[in-house]
Image (cartoon, helix red, strand yellow):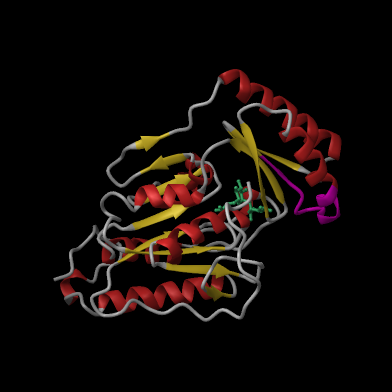
Amino acid sequence: MAPRSSPPPAAVLPHPPLPGAGERWALFLDVDGSLLDFADDPTAVVVLPALRRRLAGLHGALDGALALVSGRALADLGRLFGDPPWTLVGLHGLERHDAAGRAQAPSIEPAQVRRMRRETAALAARLGEAVRWEDKGVAAALHCRRAPSLLPALRREAMALAARLPGYELQPGDMVMEFKPAGMDKGRAVAELLAAPPFAGRRPVYLGDDLTDEHAFAAVNAARGLSVRVGGRTPSHALFTLPNPAAVQAWLSDVLDTLMKGTPPHAANPGGPPQRRP
Ligand SMILES: O=P(O)(O)OC[C@H]1O[C@H](O[C@H]2O[C@H](CO)[C@@H](O)[C@H](O)[C@H]2O)[C@H](O)[C@@H](O)[C@@H]1O
């Protein structure tokens, strides 16, 4: 699904700032292409222990105001990140598991799901074995990273199929066309999270690399937050940029250091539970 408004023309974007003194951030992080480097297969991505430790540190330093906001299914996110205590948003906003353990799932007719699964799997088979069908339960993704030349055909066929599937909409992404239940996007998910603890009253900061993240950039800009595009995709609503996941990790490390400067040494425990700063 395309973002609701057109992004401004391409511009040279600055590096994002670090938190100012006394500034309270709510941090929202996209996963693939932002926190993690791409791999040919969705199951082949690697989450290094250093990244898990850094996220745990940020979760503590931000008093719990950390969320991963992904197109992956929630179960997949839990597997990759080891069932973390922070908020997880899956399927582009349709699935949610918050810090208090509350879960949210999409409601869609089982018959519509069965039809979507059957027809998307058949489309993948028709396009050849280089196209990978990713099973995401009520959603499905057709990937062509192993054969990028198939993208135009995949896009054309996926658009035609989506027009025939009730209850579903198409979410284009990086070498992928996804079918997801209609009516939700990452921008709405972020806006809803910002209305309640631990995110409410904080300045939203969102990092993402793909078309699906544009909804969240627009929502965060409307809330006077920081929108950070990872990579060079244009046009974009983002106001800042970082070149790649390695730069994201370095910047997150600086954010954590900056937040911890106000923390007494006994509370500087990156793997520990959330600690309130004085
Ligand atoms: O919102 P995200 O966290 O960025 O998730 C978007 C999709 O990411 C995954 O696909 C992408 O990463 C794969 C692994 O690197 C890569 O093979 C694929 O080409 C990319 O599109 C994931 O598999 C999807 O389910 C997510 O929706």
- From the viewer's side, name the closer residue of 37 and 262: 262
Compared with residue 32, is residue 269 higher up or lower down, i.e. above or below? below
- From the viewer's side, name the closer residue of 67 and 162: 162
- From the viewer's side, name the closer residue of 62 and 80: 62
The residue sitting at 59% across, 53% down in the picture is 3
- The question of residue 149 being in magenta is answered with yes
Compared with residue 25, is residue 81 higher up or lower down, i.e. above or below? above
Say whether residue 7 is visible. Answer: yes
The image quadrant that residue 167 belongs to is: top right
Give the residue furthest to the left: 278
Region in magenta? 141-152
Say whether residue 135 is visible. Answer: no
User: In the figure, is residue 11 to the left or right of 271?
Assistant: right
- Return the x and y of residue 123 as percentages of the image width and height: 79, 33
Count of labels shown? 0
The residue sitting at 57% across, 36% down in the picture is 182
Can you say which quadrant of the picture contains the C terminus? bottom left
- The question of residue 72 being in magenta is answered with no
- Return the x and y of residue 88 as percentages of the image width and height: 41, 48
The image quadrant that residue 132 belongs to is: top right
- Return the x and y of residue 173 as percentages of the image width and height: 66, 52
The residue sitting at 50% across, 50% down in the picture is 186
User: In the figure, is residue 60 to the left or right of 160?
Assistant: left
- Return the x and y of residue 168 as percentages of the image width and height: 63, 33
Compared with residue 215, is residue 105 higher up or lower down, i.e. above or below? above
